[in-house]
Amino acid sequence: MKVLRYFLLGVLIVVILVGVGVGVLLNTWVNGPLPQHAGELRVAGLSAPVQIIRDENNIPHIYAATTRDLLMAQGFVQAQDRWWQMEFDRHIGAGALQELTGKTSALLGTDVFIRKAGWYEAAKRDYEALDEEHKGYLQAFADGVNAYILSRPASQLATEYNVLGVTGVNIPIEPWTPLDTLVWTKVMAWDLSGNQGNETYRSELLAALGEEMVAAYAPNYAFDRYTTIIQPEDLPGAGEPFAAPPDTAGIIGFSHDTTDLSIEAGLVFGRGSGIGSNNWVVSGDLTESGMPMLANDPHLGIGMPSIWYEIGLHCEPVSDACPYNVRGFTFAPTPGVVIGHNAHIGWGVTNVGWDTQDLYAIEVNPDNPLQYRWNGEWRDMTMRDEIIRYGDSDETLSFQVRLTHLGPVINDNRVNDDGTLSGFNNEDPLVLHWTATAETGTIFRSLMMLNKARNWDEFREALTYWDSPAQNFVYADIEGNIGYQTPSRVPVRAPGHTGLLPVDGTTDAYEWLGYVPFEYLPSVFNPSRGYIATANQALVPFEYYASLAEALADEFGADAHYVFGYEWAPGYRGQRIVDMLEAATEHNLETFRAIHGDNEITLAKEMAPFLADVDMQDAAANELRDWMLNWDYQMHHDSAQAALFALYFRQLTRAIWNDQLAEVEAEADGGGYEMFAISLLLETPDNIWWDDTTTADVTETRDDVLRAAFRAAAAEAQTLLGNDRAQWRWGTLHTATFVSNPLGLSGIGPVENLVNRGPVSVSGGSEIVNATGWSLEDFTVRAVPSMRMVLDFSDLGASVTMHTTGQSGHPASSGYGDFIEPWRNIEYHPMRWTREQVEAAAKATLRLVP
């Protein structure tokens, strides 16, 4: 963001020269956007007064007589506290970020890719297919947003307008529309879906390294080692031996130029290793109270403000016409509650990560770039014109998106070094086929049905409309039941098509055959073991797929590919949660808090015996190694051994992978896949991955690499942390900084200090239950437990939660960063539920009147 940086630097110099005006200007810029939370405001469009009560944590409870008034007030409240976040989010969905930042080379590829992928066009189709009831809900929310944002000048809506305005960026305040909400579902689906990026990466690896090395680098899930979500006892024929995963060697793939094929990082939720979640639910048989308890902590990309907004929505009275009485978390652009509970049921979600994206290699007619080969004939493409605009000039950039029946040509229009686009790619074009854009989306209908569901059957009925992204839903209700359901469209692929690599797109041989019907998706109700736990591990034992093939053979064929996916989290977190759940028979808030805050790193325990047997060929190094291994394997922020282990892990990871990955211009990231692969490599001391290809005359073995990595880590620890190991701390290296977009990336210290918070030292790490996923480069946190929630079905008013930063998106608000300290210390605040609880804790009350 160089342009933004230079503008802001110039502005700050001018402001400093002005001197006396600094305080006045900053006060106007920062405090002017603070909203009114108490008193009375007139809002056109309401049918009756609405009351909004906020507690000491700035959490609003909205009380309204009609559904329209309730959702309109929700839009008003979320715009009050999070308008800039909403503005930024809708520009992400539209591929129009440079309308907010001005022309910025770093964002050009992102805007172009989103336009190619067609998120906004897909949102339009979703809206057109909605029934009038749900269109009305979206419009009510939009009306509430607009009642707020159109009543104030931009300078009183968000600090960002004031700062960006002096750089020459002009951002007109456009009304919020239902499409701005629906396109957010595409942003969410993209960040939480897979796996087109992995397809191209795997294709490059296979071409460079061969099948054997890739199999060792990206091993299959260890079904005999770690738990699955649906356990063998949950299946018909329980007790049968596990079926082996199919051999994926030799599947059809292509080595294509994938430069600028996708967005490098997740836009909001984050992408890649560390993006996942934990949730679990236990029955009353395993709790002190005798009623279920449910926990959730979604692991998403770190940012400022929090991705979540906490809220209570209450119809008064609850009726068929106004059925909502719900408490929990939503996203700023979204009406309703995404995670939480109502008066009858509660639910939590984690990401499934099953494979809903495929890349197809097509052939373009050399005589007509708007035709592609399909089953031996040339078929016409359709076209979509796109125009990118910049907030700081009248300049525009126009380009065309080519569309096939499978999806858009996704590697057209690569960004050149000079900021121009490369145009059509007729050499090796790839088409993206993705459930979220290939089919009409119905997730908003699902969400609103979920909010008013009263039992297991209504819960499952709501989820039949949850199309993308796939999520693991855990469930509990006030009758004492617990359950699990995963919804979403998962493709049934043609024989020989695993989804792991790009495939031939010139014929229908690898076209999707359809989707797995909802009634065959994984589900369990009141399992005899008394708990269900999900942590992005494999959903089902492999024998599940044999049953699926048998059940669906008449529709899709017995030899179709029914596997949901292969690229699961390795099972460390899932198994650890299960072990901790089974270690207690009377769970309560403290046992759940211990699980939320568990920092055990399983890989360190698995590595310890191998490292202990290596002679470091130096007495001091052997003693340091023994000291490190005399450890509880908890990555606490104040742990000295944890700091040394992290440095050792980094040295080891780079030593194993980076020499060979250089052949595809990649580097190790230290995430879950590589962790698990290291664990398996330890058992094969002469595997080719241990050899350092940069030392031509030496063939290194496992022990050579373990020794060299540890000695290098010991030296690095002294350099970074000092000579006194008693003073070493994991939290010195492992810090979280909450960065606001786009000002928090400006490179200007005073501006970043205004909108960012941190760094703060944190415990945990990658593939740990307390999943503060690190960057291998410097251990800074790139993904976090974005909120933690514990629902208590013996008394819903005793439930607790905490999200990462605070309720407010205004830097001057006391609610901007007040959650950071309790969040990092695994503390909670009350999830007040009854009106009596809310009124007793009231700190501000606002009446909205017609």
Image (cartoon, rainbow, N blue to C red):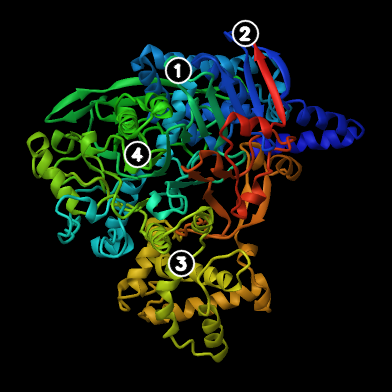
Residue at coordinates 25% horizontally, 47% vertically from top-left?
254
Q: How many marks?
A: 4
Q: Which residue is mark 3?
A: 654
Earlier sequence position, callout 3 versus callout 1: 1
**Labelled disc at residue 319:** 1
Which badge, 4 or 1, is on the more N-terminal residue?
Answer: 1
Q: Amino acid at mark 1?
A: Ser
Of badges 4 and 2, the one in the foreground is: 2
In three-dimensional space, the C-alpha distance between marks 3 and 4, rounded to whole angstroms, equals 33 Å
Amino acid type, callout 4? Ala
- Foreground mark, 3 or 2, reads 2
Q: Quadrant of the C terminus?
A: top right
361 or 406: which is nearer to us?
Answer: 406
Quadrant of the drawing holding the N terminus: top right
Task: Give the structural element (helix, strand or loop) at label 2.
Answer: loop
Real-space Cα distance between discs 4 and 2?
Answer: 38 Å
- The span from disc 3 to disc 1 (Cα, nearest Å) is 60 Å
On screen, residue 80 above or below 290: above
Q: Amino acid at mark 2?
A: Ala
> In the image, residue 330 lies at what x, y percent?
51, 32
Decide which of 105, 708 is in the foreground and name it. Answer: 708
Residue pictured at 54% horizontal, 78% vertical: 628
Viewer-nearest of discs 3 and 1: 1
Q: Is residue 102 visible?
A: no
- Binning the other alpha carbons within 10 Å of mark 1 as few (below 14), some (14 to 19) or many (20 upward) gives few
The residue where tag 4 is placed is 470
> Which residue sits at x=51%, y=14%?
66
Name, please, the residue furthest toward the right: 20
Residues at circles 4 and 2 in contact by the CB criterion of under 8 Å:
no
Mark 2, residue position:
44
- Coordinates of residue 839 in the picture (x, y in percent): 66, 30
Find the distance from the CA under tag 3 to the CA under tag 2.
61 Å
